[in-house]
């Protein structure tokens, strides 16, 4: 995407997430809302959705593969992969839950949510001095509020599909 398109996408998702989480859900937690809108912005790029790779360089496409890989890593690498698992599962369970519920009556959806909650919690428990990683307290809140964040993301999707309030979201 070009820089102008990126800026418009960033503003759109930031605005719609803020409106949804704060106004509709009553979640006044700016770092959490910023993280969720950032997740949407990052996952617009398909290469980010599937960025997790094993030691051989092969893309890890399933959550169980990612979890197995995370168990073999240490320190920041382990924390980053657990955070990615949380992000990956939150994105799919929140934005496209129907893809997880179609084939098995919802069992895959519940499994994704369990993996996501646990992965965010595990990431929060790994010490890191890196300032470019989210604080442990934010990752812990994502774990605690995973289901609510999923619901919020479903509402964000509903708003972008119907255009509810989108004329007001792009105003700077």
Image (tube, rainbow, N blue to C red):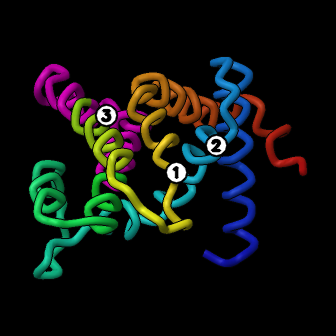
Image coordinates for residue 167, horizontal then vertical, percent: 83, 39
Q: Nearer the viewer, mark 2 or mark 1?
A: 1
Query: Mark 2 and mark 3: span between their CA atoms?
Result: 18 Å
Q: 10 Å neighbourhood of mark 3: few (<14), some, or many (≥20)?
A: many
Quadrant for the N terminus, please.
Answer: bottom right
Give the spatial CA distance, label 2 vs label 1: 10 Å
Q: In this view, does 132 lie to the left or right of 12?
A: left
Question: Which residue occupies 34% across, 34% down?
Answer: 93
Residue at label 3? 117
Q: In which quarter of the image is residue 33?
A: top right
Task: Please give the residue where the numbered disc 1 appears in the rendered image.
Answer: 135
How far across and down, in percent of the image, does residue 11 sit?
Answer: 74, 53
Q: Is mark 2 on a helix, strand or loop?
A: helix
1 and 3 marks in contact (CB < 8 Å): no
Q: List x then y, in percent, for residue 85.
A: 29, 50
Q: Where is residue 142 in the image (x, y as percent from the top left)?
A: 45, 36
Is 102 within the magenta?
A: yes
- The magenta segment is 84-113
């Amino acid at each position: 995407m070009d820089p102008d398109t990126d800026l418009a996408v960033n503003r759109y998702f930031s605005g719609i997430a803020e409106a949804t989480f704060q106004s509709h859900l009553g979640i006044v937690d700016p770092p959490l809302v910023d993280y969720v809108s950032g997740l949407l912005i990052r996952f617009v790029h398909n290469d980010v959705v599937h960025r997790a790779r094993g030691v051989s360089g092969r893309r890890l496409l399933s959550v169980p593969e990612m979890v197995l890989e995370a168990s073999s890593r240490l320190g920041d690498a382990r924390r980053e992969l657990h955070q990615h698992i949380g992000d990956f599962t939150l994105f799919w369970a929140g934005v496209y839950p129907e893809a997880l519920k179609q084939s098995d009556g919802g069992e895959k959806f519940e499994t994704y949510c369990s993996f996501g909650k646990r992965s965010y919690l595990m990431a929060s428990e790994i010490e890191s001095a890196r300032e470019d990683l989210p604080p442990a307290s934010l990752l812990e809140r994502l774990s605690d509020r995973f289901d609510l964040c999923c619901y919020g993301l479903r509402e964000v999707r509903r708003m972008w599909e119907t255009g509810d309030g989108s004329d007001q979201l792009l105003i700077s």
